[in-house]
Amino acid sequence: MSYEGEFVDGELEGIGKVTFHSGDLYEGSFVKSMFNGYGNYKYADGLRVSIRVKCRLLGTLLTGSVQSMGRKCLLMVESMLER
């Protein structure tokens, strides 16, 4: 996997582009190294989709701070684009 884009504290953050070993490509926004917000995903076979990802933190509030147990994300295909 290769990444071109912004980093914050060593994590993919902001707008960037990831090329996977399979040849798939994602261009869009990242939050804490995860797809988040709007982007375009292009499969190696040429199929392209516009996606939107919404994530929320899962955790518990302990002593005034959130103790994270991970994130739950919902990926929505906004539209299929031409090959």
Image: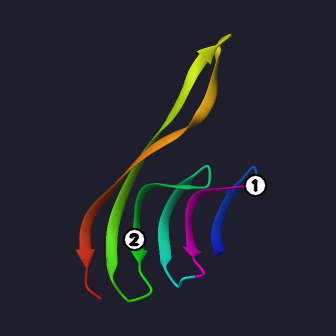
Image-based side of 76 in relation to 64, left or right: left
The type of residue carrying mark 2 is: Asn
Give how far across and how far down residue 75 sits, in percent.
36, 55
The type of residue carrying mark 1 is: Gly
Is residue 68 one of those drawn in magenta?
A: no
Up/down of 56 relative to 23, above or below: above
Q: Residue furthest top?
A: 63
Residue linked to disc 1: 10
**Where on the picture, by quarter, is residue 67?**
top right
Disc 2 + disc 1, Cβ < 8 Å: no
Is residue 19 one of those drawn in magenta?
A: yes
Give how far across and how far down residue 9 sits, in percent.
75, 49
Q: In what quadrant of the picture does the C terminus appear?
A: bottom left
Give how far across and how far down residue 21 sits, in percent.
60, 81
Image-based side of 19 in relation to 26, left or right: right
**Picture residue at 34% right of the left edge, 79% below the top:** 48
Mark 2: few, some, or many residues within 10 Å (few <14, many ≥20)? many
Give how far across and how far down residue 51 sits, in percent.
34, 63
Up/down of 50 relative to 52, above or below: below
Residue linked to disc 2: 40
Q: In what quadrant of the picture does the N terminus appear?
A: bottom right
Up/down of 27 relative to 13, above or below: below
**Where on the picture, by quarter, is residue 60?**
top right
**Picture residue at 26% right of the left edge, 62% below the top:** 78
Q: Colour scheme used in the picture?
A: rainbow
Secondary structure mostly seen in magenta is strand
Q: Residue furthest right?
A: 10
Q: Nearer the viewer, residue 32 or 22?
A: 22
Q: Which contiguous range is marked in magenta?
A: 10-21
